[in-house]
Image (spheres, helix red, strand yellow):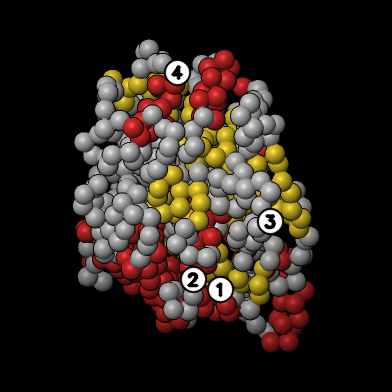
Amino acid sequence: MRRTVALLSASLFTLAAGAASAQNATPHNLILFVPDGLRALKVTPETAPAMAEVRDKGVNFKNPHSVFPTFTMANGSAMATGHYLGDTGTFSNTIYSGYTSVPGGDTVTPFLENDAVLGDIDEHFKGNYLNEETLLKVARANGFSTAAIGKVGPTYIFDHTDRTDKGPAPHSIVVDDATGSKTGVPLSDEMKDALTKANLPLTTPGRGDNGKAGDAKTAGTTAANTAQQAYFADVASKVVLPMLRAQNKPFVLVFWSRDPDGTQHNQGDSLNTITPGINGPTSLAGIKNADDNLAQLRKSLDELGLAASTDIIISADHGFSTISKESKTSPSAKASYGDTPQNYLPMGFLALDLAKALDLPLYDPNDKNAKIGDNAHTKAGNGLIGNDPAKPDLVIAANGGSDLIYLPNNDKELADRTIKALLEQDYVSGLFVDDALGNFPGTLPISEVNLKGKAVTPNPSIVVNFRSYVEGCNEPTNCSVEVADTVLRQGQGMHGSFGRGDTMNFMAAIGPDFKAGYVDALPVSNADVGMTAAKLLDLHASAQGGLMGRVMSEALPNGETPKSSEGELTSKPAANGLQTIVKYQSVLSQRYFDAAGFAGRTVGIEAEGSKEKTAGK
Ligand SMILES: [Zn+2]
């Protein structure tokens, strides 16, 4: 498919007539660079000079939005397809699959950042669990060279449906954490030869010290993910970009940097204390590491003569928050566990508290459905609640700043009791309920936040957002603190909530198809990234669902600049007065969700009567 780009055609025709430029007939290349978990306002010329340069010389998307739940796989699915999660079914990093995933560890709650799990879930859902076409696959089918390099999971979903175990079928180049292992996508002979010639190993190095999360008594890592990402950056700049250039076709390259996410999660700067949290030196080193990777890619584009013909979109999947494990209401915080400080929430607190409130037994889907006794929690925080773990009444998929609850029997009475129990807990801030279960005071329907569409994976019955607040600095989205259901400790890092700290991801772009020195005040999202990438490449994916982002036309030369407005949704009050509030902005038919939760319990949702401005606008 040839690229036309109606938006640019007038000026290009003028240029071509004058300068007889042959270049205009050739589509531009695209690099999508994802600095995982990079907060928008942490980028300065000091902390991240390469990213600051793209933002300041190219397009500064100053009103960015991660899609909720603000997790990696969820937002990866939005970038890869241009669709919201109600269509892609990637509701978080851990979902209820509705069947036992063997590669996921014989569990109905698989963690999706795993190529073998993705292959298995694809197979279960008729070959494509996303139920939408992905950017690299469509680009490849239209004659582009394609490659995806970086963090395992999101890297692969950009072209995940054509894998065969017989070797590299026609497929994008994929190099991720699993490359060289039995779950990795096989390398072609051409890639193996090129890596060898460049003195690069055929197996991705591990994270080393960066992978150490510590425990309640041992601080986590103080090292960024430099060694592993130096490998990815070398593969991209020394092997893949030269190869793509030699193929002499326009190309699309996705580079997914695990940093700063991995480092902010595991950092050992703040064991059991809220400050400095994710604003300590280790987290800053993680930000700089991602920035160094970007600088290396841009230098390579320069050296290969590709800079002028390559667009770069940078979009973090989500923001980040420091973890709180505090609750005054949680029964599970009052019990004792071998691995959790006294009075702190244990991993899996939501499953524990619900089992207690509903007076039903709790089983562990990540431990052969073992029953959980007193003073214990499940291995990954997930839970099966009910008398028969093979036919649970509730399934809890623990994720971090928000959790998913599934009611496989769609029992409305049980939903009502579950919601009432959740409304009693101080760590809850906002509840979204599957429209199919009906309306419940204190909650809003999941359809209001784009979580109800054509997904083929099971729809969550209740999405539970956890409390967030600001501590440690005066910039709310840089100093968000949130309750998180995770093995990680108070003071380490997490995301996934509906607070502005987690929804405010870093976004910027530069290149021949973008305005230069332009500050975009309109709201934009990661679904828009997918739609805009497709537009730049003149690709037209066929859509199953209708929950699609928009082309960020205002950032393109001669593009339309639509109008935006602000809005708010408020649920009926629950018996105790709590109301789920959603603050959003609108452009055309799109809604951009800034924050959601109960008044005063979410960063960006002010307390009742407060005159404070909403954070992060
Ligand atoms: Zn993360």
Marks 3 and 1 in Cβ contact (< 8 Å): no
Closer to us: mark 4 or mark 3?
3
- Residue under label 4, please give it: 358
In space, the residues marked 2 and 1 are separated at their CA atoms by 9 Å
Q: Earlier in the sequence, mark 3 or mark 1?
A: 1
Q: Residues within 10 Å of mark 1 (few under 14, many from 20)?
A: many
Percent coordinates x, y for residue 308 in the rendering: 55, 79
In space, the residues marked 4 and 3 are separated at their CA atoms by 39 Å
Q: Amino acid at mark 3?
A: Lys
In space, the residues marked 3 and 1 are separated at their CA atoms by 32 Å
Residue at image coords 38%, 71%:
288
Residue at image coords 68%, 84%:
20
Marks 2 and 1 in Cβ contact (< 8 Å): yes
Marks 1 and 4 in Cβ contact (< 8 Å): no
Marks 2 and 4 in Cβ contact (< 8 Å): no
For the C terminus, which image quadrant?
Answer: bottom right
For the N terminus, which image quadrant?
Answer: bottom right
Q: Relative to the observer, which residue lies in front, 40 or 206?
A: 40
Tell me the element at label 1. Answer: helix
Q: Relative to the observer, which residue lies in front, 228 or 362?
A: 362
Closer to us: mark 1 or mark 4?
4
Mark drawn on residue 55: 1
Closer to us: mark 2 or mark 4?
4
- Residue under label 3, please give it: 611
Percent coordinates x, y for residue 12 in the rendering: 71, 77
Tell me the element at label 4. Answer: helix
- Is 535 on the left or on the right of 34, as rendered? right
Q: Amino acid at mark 2?
A: Val
Percent coordinates x, y for residue 96 in the rendering: 44, 30
